[in-house]
Amino acid sequence: MAEPAYPAARVVAPTMASYFHRHLAVEDESHGKMALLPDAGSIERMIDAAFWASLRREEGYIPKISLAFLRPEQTVSPLLFERPLPLGPAALARLAPAVERPGIHLGVWREREELRVWGTTRAIPTFCFVVEVIDPGLLVVKHRRSESGKFVNVLVLEGDQIKVVDERASSLPDCPPLLTSLLGFESPSSWLEGVHVLVELAASMRAHRRGGSLLVVPAGTEPWRESILQPVGYAVAPPFTELADVMRADAGERQQRRWQDAMYRSVEAIAGLTAVDGATVITDQYELLCFGAKIGRRRESTRVQEVVVTEPIEGSAAVTVHPAELGGTRHLSAAQFVQDQRDAVSLVASQDGRFTIFAWSPCETMVHAHRVESLLL
């Protein structure tokens, strides 16, 4: 196919071009960096090629690729092909086995008015346009917002479904810090101070695809136990503090690869516990208290009847539903826990990939369910 044939690519290309031009103008003015400035035509062709490549199979495997729009000179230690490859589904599918590991991007740039794949890179500038294949027909457009290396999702495409992440969601009342971090609008200091650990926990919980619940309660408090049925499946005594100890490192230590590896290992260990039937409980200082816990209704509390549900996607509206409409027992019990323990937050991963943050909303005076799976892809 010489011309793009994925209709959604043409629909979203002007919106994405406007988004990246707007943010790159600010970045260039603030930091004096060379703007990458992807045009609508280039965006359309990259999305189109990624979409059709995602539907192919290479020796039975689903292609997992990430395309980044930049010149070789705009990265560090690029791997350069002697002859750049055409940006087409067949070429991308053949390359996929070599670049499917996280952090590797295929570099794309113009050559004689045509987009070509010039090689691979692990380092990309901030606000560089990236389109990633997650699953067949499922693509995410993202970029790195800061030097922290964290990626921010801008657009999710699944077949004919188009979800543009709402930049204004972080300014809504009662927006929990975790959601603000997922949206990419937290300050670099808050990223280093620890909010991002919950982001990593959420991503790891979703990745194991067994479903799970993580309850975050204030450190040094006991009332949360009134909402947990006794005996607890797997109580931890004394609290397991490996992740908490890692997070006590100063800002200088956190810049080191050794600290990052230790943090990810600790996150994976705790996220793995959420796959056990029941809820995992940690403190807001990242101490593990128990896992496999069954949530019950606090004595003299009322049964949760409704929650307000929002998703940080443009055009979506808040709706009020019974928590059972969000999922099964896991979602219902998480909503009940937050209604009874209003200073706590519940993170719930579904086996189908959905992810919900439950937090108490003082403005709505009810439990607020934030659907955030589009931010975790």
Image (spheres, rainbow, N blue to C red):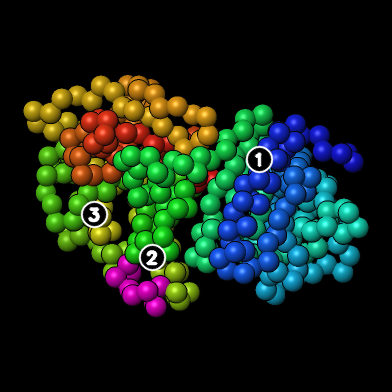
Q: Is residue 134 visible?
A: no
Locate residue 50 relative to residue 191 in the image: left or right.
Answer: right
The quadrant of the image that shows the N terminus is: top right
| Residue indicated by mark 1 | 15
* Circle 1 crowding by C-alpha within 10 Å: few under 14, some 14–19, many from 20: some
Extreme residue toward the front, this view: 29
> Do callouts 2 and 1 mark residues in contact (Cβ within 8 Å)?
no
Residue range highlighted in magenta: 246-254
| Residue 332 in which image quadrant | top left
Seen at 23% across and 44% down, the residue is 344
Q: Which mark is residue 186?
A: none
Asked if residue 113 is among those painted magenta in the image, a careful observer would answer: no
- Compared to residue 286, the image places residue 31 above or below, namely below
Comparing 175 with 219, the one in front is 175
User: Where does the image place residue 326, in percent across and percent down from the top left?
Assistant: 39, 27
SS at circle 1: helix
| Residue 116 in which image quadrant | bottom right
Comparing 261 with 278, the one in front is 261
